[in-house]
Amino acid sequence: MSESHVKTLELTLIESINLALNRAMILHPEMVVLGEDVGVNGGVFRATEGLRDKFGLKRVMDTPLAEALIAGITVGMAAQGLRPVAEIQFMGFIFAAMEQLATHAARLRNRTRGRLSCPMVIRAPYGGGIHAPEHHSESTEALFAHIPGLRVVIPSSPVRAYGLLLSAIESNDPVIFLEPKRIYRLTKSNVIDNGKSLPLDSCFILREGKDMTLVSWGAMITETMQAAKILASKDIDCEVIDLATISPFDRETIVHSVKKTGRCCIIHEASRNCGVGAEIAACVSEFAFPYLKAPTSRICGYDTIMPYFQNEQDYLPSVEKIVDTVVASYASKKEAAYANI
Amino acid sequence: MSESHVKTLELTLIESINLALNRAMILHPEMVVLGEDVGVNGGVFRATEGLRDKFGLKRVMDTPLAEALIAGITVGMAAQGLRPVAEIQFMGFIFAAMEQLATHAARLRNRTRGRLSCPMVIRAPYGGGIHAPEHHSESTEALFAHIPGLRVVIPSSPVRAYGLLLSAIESNDPVIFLEPKRIYRLTKSNVIDNGKSLPLDSCFILREGKDMTLVSWGAMITETMQAAKILASKDIDCEVIDLATISPFDRETIVHSVKKTGRCCIIHEASRNCGVGAEIAACVSEFAFPYLKAPTSRICGYDTIMPYFQNEQDYLPSVEKIVDTVVASYASKKEAAYANI
Amino acid sequence: MTTVTSNSINKEQLNFSISRYSLLNNKGELSEELPESIADMKQALHAYKTMVLGRAFDKKAIALQRTGKLGTYPSILGQEAISTAIGVALDEKDIFAPYYRDLTAQYLRGVSLKEMLLYWGGSEQGSNYQNCKKDFPVCIPIATQLSHAAGAAISLKVQGIHQAALVTCGDGATSKGDFLETLNLAGAWQLPLVMVVNNNQWAISTPRSVQCAAQTIAQKAIGAGIEGVVVDGNDYFAVLFAIKEALVKAYSGKGATLIEAVTYRLGDHTTADDADRYRDPKELKQAWKNEPIKRLQNYLLKHNLWNEDKERKLIELVASEINESVQAYLDEPKQGPESMFEFLYESIPENLYDQYAEAKYQRFQTEIDKM
Amino acid sequence: MTTVTSNSINKEQLNFSISRYSLLNNKGELSEELPESIADMKQALHAYKTMVLGRAFDKKAIALQRTGKLGTYPSILGQEAISTAIGVALDEKDIFAPYYRDLTAQYLRGVSLKEMLLYWGGSEQGSNYQNCKKDFPVCIPIATQLSHAAGAAISLKVQGIHQAALVTCGDGATSKGDFLETLNLAGAWQLPLVMVVNNNQWAISTPRSVQCAAQTIAQKAIGAGIEGVVVDGNDYFAVLFAIKEALVKAYSGKGATLIEAVTYRLGDHTTADDADRYRDPKELKQAWKNEPIKRLQNYLLKHNLWNEDKERKLIELVASEINESVQAYLDEPKQGPESMFEFLYESIPENLYDQYAEAKYQRFQTEIDKM
Ligand SMILES: Cc1ncc(C[n+]2csc(CCOP(=O)(O)OP(=O)(O)O)c2C)c(N)n1
Ligand SMILES: Cc1ncc(C[n+]2csc(CCOP(=O)(O)OP(=O)(O)O)c2C)c(N)n1
Ligand SMILES: [Mg+2]
Ligand SMILES: [Mg+2]
């Protein structure tokens, strides 16, 4: 693309998703978009708005209401020359697609020793905070992260959404691309429509710091950054890492950071038990143990069902909770341990 | 039951499952059994053998081939006065049932504020090592452990299989009961058919020790116990804990043990990334940090797809690997850390 | 089974059929006399009143949503006859598994308007029905309620109870595996189950034609070996008749029925939707002509069972019942954070105690702040 | 559409049909002349030979399993005609999505016996087909292959390629949501897709009657608005004709077909099964009378296209091909542990390097030990 055609636009996260889809449709003639209501309606969040008019019926397909089918035909198309990008309307409805994703999307390459593969993306809005009915506020990224063969990616800003969605589409591996709907329209930032993708094996250091490593992703990056600011005013200098590629993840950068700060705190919206935070905490303990000055803590959604919206704020980790936990963790001394060694 | 009727039998794990099902059918007239081939055929592993003859067509139902349906009708039956125990033929085929399990079984009680509930059990053989075709060797307990509202239980001996299955059936919560098929017929032990259930919130200390806590479950308990024996001969005295109730789990006993030994190693067959081992490692780090003399290590299946059976032994953690890891971990000094504190 | 020649070889034809009918036209005229089973005029009047109430509540709910006092709400506009007929037809001891456009059926089953407001207002308390304790709550994951109803029907059968389970879903739902798995089981096990499809022509923006190439949805019953029926879903009497027949069949152990009730969604999919983006306004205008309430009203007027005066009074009564319910809903205190833990398991597992305590403390903090 | 009176009100009947046919009886006699499209006798001979090979391979595979040289294996005994007709009918450029009883179709597509042995012998190498690179591998999770084939058909349609996708499954598979979701889509999108059901009367121990109350499986097509056909699955010519018609229809953009091929599973479900536990031996004995190979042989003998001498030679040739393949399979070295990582992602992610290295080291250790 000639540089003169590159436009810079001030966009929300959802608009940058739309922009990336547009760009990818141009770059990849084999790409198709499919899902419930993605055509004329442009998706219930408008992620696919305008695509049908621009690229036609054959490349933008409204499917029947059947998530297992959507995932299954996506696998079939991906194996046979197309590059499908399917939308699951809400992550809470992705369960019916699990069999296809776990037993086929994740495995076709391995099963055929590379003969067939699944260059496909499953996009789904995820997470709470938008006052939606039941099942519209889930964060179950850990379920997909535990399935070898899948990639799980979550952007946390318009710029990263653009670059990561492009790379997800370009990847020849199946990617579960989860969009934090709470921040779909929260802020705008400048996105350069240059078709450049971001790496799928790196996390992003959003703020450098020396006292404590905060690892988060998705919408919780907002609260995490706010907390980091407040903590700075309390003389706790936090390094904030956006995990972004949830699986496979960039262990090295995190471990490196914790080796520097000696402390780590993971913040995510999903339930704590067997969440992705557990994996990071376990890795930190395995790979940075001698450097740890305090136990790694996790600030997560409770191990409960995401409540209906009257109570969803009670469930979601707050800035205050992050600040309090970090302060407590920072104050905790390691000395207690010495006696027992 | 009068004590005079209590029989003691020498049984394999699968036989004790069958015994528990028989006993529970007698104890609970509202209990029914359903699944693919559970009737005349008695299940492909014979877990339900004889039940149909004894309890009739109405209480032992062969279903059509549809896992989502099996889970869905199980929810419906459980909500309306029955106590269904459904079999999913192999855990690799449970994915189609995920939507019903995650969005309904786990939630019906919470959703109706206790008005309706799901006293149900989903039984499934799981794990590798029996030379089976693809999808017949999965260990995906972590996926269910991450879903609040479900209970996940895994027995590792005939006696515990009997007692835990009874308690799973008696529980008014939905229980995913995973049976380690590799040890279905490995050994026999004395099972007392007294109808007594085991608690669903306790792990089992299978061996006491002072140097290192080994946490495992399911079939891997076999290798873990063998390793503990070898390690004892190398003067490393291991405490072996069978997690058994995978979620919610008995954190206290584990943390207590690690506080005593100062070291923890978790052994499981499932892939490492976001596996249940990560949760335990994270908890150990959170709750026993000052007592830790070495990083908590995890000995797991690789983060790959369970290979076809020619290579399954390459995937499964071996006794040797457990021994080597524990020895290395035991030798690792904490001193390195001091410099950085 | 006739033998005909097609292409170059002899093929035997296997024939199947479903039935279709309506009774009441837009003018309120019957095509034939009402069968006795549905000729009770007190019942018809009650149904009419319920439909009027349903529509008024619907309007109010949308208004509440627009002013931030309710969450996303799915309008039942134009589809009142189906759900009302269900509510009228069902026996108290039958088990109902509704979908999210079953306001009037649920109301007739005893779910209070306040409970419904609580539900759409984001509180789990809304599904803790006080008056129909065994009915299933509203089901959000499309089509998954069908197998619950089948489970309920199995439960009845196993326990030897001669009642039925009735379940509803939309036309879009018929594309999802659960619908067909359940249909198939209903046939194979001859379940006392009635499946009613509200075919309102749309699944959000997806028209009926995109869901399925079959002429009718009812014909899916053929593949399961059960009876399929198409009725005019804006014809209260036809729907009621179909459901009553299906229930009688179920009670007597003769198995399941699939009923397709053809109607039209006159509103947006939900308050979060804007149907103008995808729907031809002409189609909408046309559809208004067939709407069910006016039609039943015409019938009642024609038979001197109703008049303007009664209508005026009804509207007043309805308004006051709705207003009272809205007030009760708005007055209902929000549940405490600890409620997240209290219905999760039968009792709170030990390793959740610390989180539970934290949530309780959270509540305490909020209350302190309020002081 | 006729109008009949049922119960107390007038109901219009909507009628639908599917067709059923057979051509060849057990004695090898045709009920009518073979249509031109399938009258090629060279092809029929080739099909016969393939079926004989299939049955011999099947026997060998079971023997290998019994002696610990193969894993669980699903016998195709008695079902050879269906899969063979598929292999004969398909064009090289069509896309085939098989299930696990498609030995002969896969063989005709170019999958080698060695590859099949590797597959059932527990090696992923068995699905790395050298000769039909776009075909899907055998699919284990029941019915999930159907939507892959639909995806392939969409891919053909989007790319404007006038070929078809063909997919198979068993009778049990037709109860699973995927089957019906795919069938429905095939109709709605008029896909170039042929769905062939091997109705062998059993799903492990579950008889056809427990799966579904419908008279035929083919009638499930009615609910999706597509054509449904029942053929005698032990009649090679009938199956071939049905598939060829369906393919021509698909090539010309006229949509999908569901073909139910009625046969009988003469063996156990797999080598892990014991059908004596649940199957009436009389039923089995009866079913043997209809088996497909003898039937086609009778036809060929009757038309002097085959004789005892040729049969003897064929059996020898087949045995030697099978033995060679078995040897090649047994000689194939086991993959190294590191192979687990090599096809997982397009390239090995950085955070798996340590595990990959460990697996490589594991291999090294094993090789050292072998020295
Ligand atoms: C499994 C699942 N997928 C997607 C959705 C999102 N969704 C809610 S309603 C709806 C359309 C339903 O259409 P239909 O079944 O015709 O019912 P209607 O709303 O028209 O009454 C969709 C796609 C959902 N709730 N559940
Ligand atoms: C989703 C799923 N559930 C269960 C199984 C276990 N299983 C393997 S074959 C089979 C029966 C299949 O019957 P059918 O579809 O009639 O095919 P057939 O084996 O008779 O050819 C079952 C239940 C499976 N492979 N996949
Ligand atoms: Mg609809
Ligand atoms: Mg079969």
Image: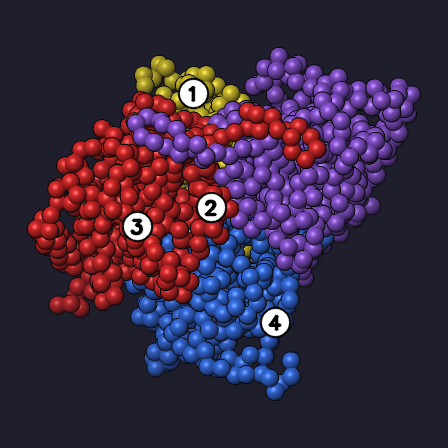
Chain colours: A blue, B yellow, C red, D purple
SS assignment at label 4: helix
Q: Which residue is mark 3?
A: C290
**Whether marks 1 and 2 lie on the same chain:** no
Q: Are marks 2 and 4 in contact (CB under 8 Å)?
A: no
Q: Are marks 1 and 4 in contact (CB under 8 Å)?
A: no
Location of the N terminus of chain A (image quadrant): bottom right
What residue is shown with label 1? Answer: B57
Q: In the image, which is nearer the foreground, mark 3 or mark 1?
A: 3
Badge 4: few (under 14), some or many (20 or more) residues near its Cα, within 10 Å?
few
Percent position (x, y) of residue A75? 60, 52
**Position above or below: B83 against B259:** above
Find numbered disc 3 in the image and state the secondary structure of the residue it sits on.
loop
| Label 2 – label 4 distance at C-alpha | 32 Å
Chain for numbered disc 2: C
User: Nearer the observer, disc 3 or disc 2?
Assistant: 3
| Amino acid residing under circle 4 | Ile
Identify the element where label 1 is drawn.
Answer: loop
Q: Chain of mark 4?
A: A
Q: What's the mark number on residue A26?
A: 4
Determine whether the beta carbon of the residue marked 3 sits less than 8 angstroms from the nearest atom of ligand 3.
Answer: no
Chain ID, mark 1: B
Q: CA distance from mark 1 to mark 2?
A: 32 Å
Residue B81 screen position, x and y as percent: 30, 31
Whole-percent x, y for residue A3 in the image: 62, 85
Task: Pick the residue in front: B299 or A117.
Answer: A117
Residue kind at label 2, given as amino acid type: Ser
Residue C92 to residue D135: above or below: above
Picture residue at 83% right of the left edge, 19% below the top: D302
Evaluate whether label 1 is on the same chain as label 4.
Answer: no
Asked if residue B220 can be seen in this view, the reply is no
Residue lying at 30% horizontally and 55% vertically, measured from the top left:
C288
Q: Quick one: SS at disc 2? A: helix
